[in-house]
Image (tube, helix red, strand yellow):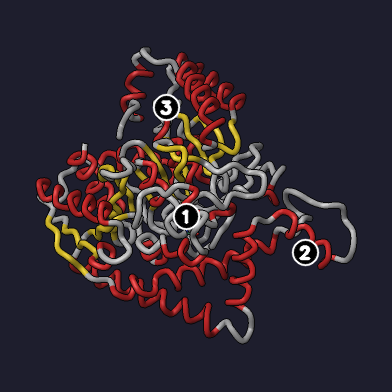
Amino acid sequence: MKKALSILEFHEQVTSGNLSILEHTAKILEEAKKANKEFHHFNLMAEKEAMQRAEQLEKLLKQKKANGKLFGVPVSVKDCICVKGMESTAGSAILKGYNPLFNATVVEKALQEGAIIIGKTSQDEFGFGTFSNNVGLGFEKPKNPQDAERSCGGSSGGSAGFTAFTKFTHVSIAESTGGSIACPASFCGAFGFTPTYGRVSRYGLIDYANSLDKIGTTSQSIQDSALLLEAIAGKDGKDSTSLQEKVEDYSKLLNEKSKNLRIGVVKEFFGKGIDKQVSEKCWNAVKKLESEGIKYEEVSLPLNAKYGIAAYYLVAMTEASTNLARYCGLRYGQSLELEGNFDEFFSKTRTEFFGEEAKRRIILGTFARMSGFRDAYYLRAMKIRTLLIEEFQKAFKKFSLLANPTMPIVAPKFSEIEKLTPLQNYAMDLCTVPANLAGLPHASIPAGKSEKEKMPIGLMLTAAHLKEKELLQASQFLEKVMS
Ligand code: GLN
């Protein structure tokens, strides 16, 4: 899919004086601004800030002080990740007007590596969705760059949409709770990379579900994702769930010929409920990897296939309903005239500013953790989660990677999405939620287009905890054989 210069190529051009950071930034902003009228990939464009930053970096370049893995690279940031001074709403009307006083750790790290933040990308409200159609009240839905009648996927729809759209060097910092990076990457034809839970700090992320949220990347090439990941990963004193393990030089290790990669093709995710065009393309992609010396065999994950969706939605909604309790109209974002007692004020504010899906999740999540129901729903879902992780661990004794279609369908039209019931909608996450529940690193890699709709199809590869290197290597092999 690569159309633009990769980050490494961009740096070569910049340091040899063939490319001006200032001009490149101006051009991508112009492109994004124009496209935003139709495609709505951004909730906010940071034109002024980006141009000032570009000027600053140009100066450093002239003084021979250019340095950093992302030096001069335009980076977009999903709206749920806080950027100092830039309205950060997580796509929700209730957070309108909230301008963080601090940067999320990932943003801080990207800036230290010379990134230029160009804006905040559109998403489902708080990440609640699969199609970026559940945007907050007053927000626009992002549209698929391949066909504007179709969804970008969700919830990081704007990140993947713009990544696939732009002709310039660009990466996006996205977030996944249950598949929100892989899904839109697959629908738009971008690379989506979700690291191990805890590999990247969540400090400054507006939470959806704390035990599931992971910050990751969308990019035009695997190598760009590897560079961005290297820049943002690592232990952070401000996030106690972030992992100690040393961050590897992913981008340098990419080209090492990795030995003995074995892929397990997940049987259940190639059968019932999966569009035939999708499963065929994904099988072909796996077979092509054989030419790189990667062996494959079928594997079965019956528990994940049967219970993944139910366990995921129970855990996710329970955590979400607690997280959303902080939006009471007093601390952040929008507020109404203060009147009545607290309960009345709280209900009125939330009724006014939360969208339909957020309300649905608050109600279901609260129910699942209420006394009397907690054991039957939330705690049972947690026990199942452990069983699902064990099933994965067993598979990883034999295989280094697991493969399946990222999504069961190609990007649907908005008119088709409207006809789905909430349950049918949730069922679309069949293949992505298991790896997310288990906190496993996974990637969605473009694996061709459907014959009928000519829409992108993504193959999802999943690795064991902290095996980011192997995952990136295999993804790059796939990128090579698919291009
Ligand atoms: N579609 C899933 C959900 O609605 C995943 C979303 C996400 O990862 N943020 O919960």
Q: Which of marks 3 and 2 is nearer the N terminus?
A: 3
The quadrant in which the N terminus is found is: top left
Q: Residue visible at 21% across and 53% down?
A: 280
Q: Distance between the residues labelled 3 and 1?
A: 38 Å
Q: Nearer the viewer, mark 3 or mark 1?
A: 1
The quadrant in which the C terminus is found is: top left
Q: What residue type is labelled 2?
A: Ser
Residue 347 circle label: 2
Q: Residues within 10 Å of mark 3 (few under 14, many from 20)?
A: some
Residue 37 drawn above or below residue 287: above
The answer to whether mark 2 is within 8 Å of ligand 1 is no
Q: Residue visible at 44% across and 40% down?
A: 144
Q: Answer whether labels 3 and 1 touch (C-beta < 8 Å).
A: no
The answer to whether mark 1 is within 8 Å of ligand 1 is yes
Among the 4 quarters of the image, the one containing residue 433: bottom left
Q: What residue type is labelled 3?
A: Asn
Q: What element carries label 2?
A: helix
10 with respect to 312 (left or right): left
- 401 or 481, nearer to the observer: 481
- 443 or 237, nearer to the observer: 443
Expressed as whole percent of the image width and height from the top left, the position of residue 14 reads 38, 18
Q: Earlier in the sequence, mark 3 or mark 1?
A: 3
Expressed as whole percent of the image width and height from the top left, the position of residue 23 reads 47, 16
Residue 67 circle label: 3
Residue 130 circle label: 1
- 340 or 117, nearer to the observer: 340
Residue 276 circle label: none
305 with respect to 72 (left or right): left
Q: Which amino acid does label 1 sit on?
A: Thr
Residue 439 can be seen in this image: no
- 110 or 405, nearer to the observer: 405
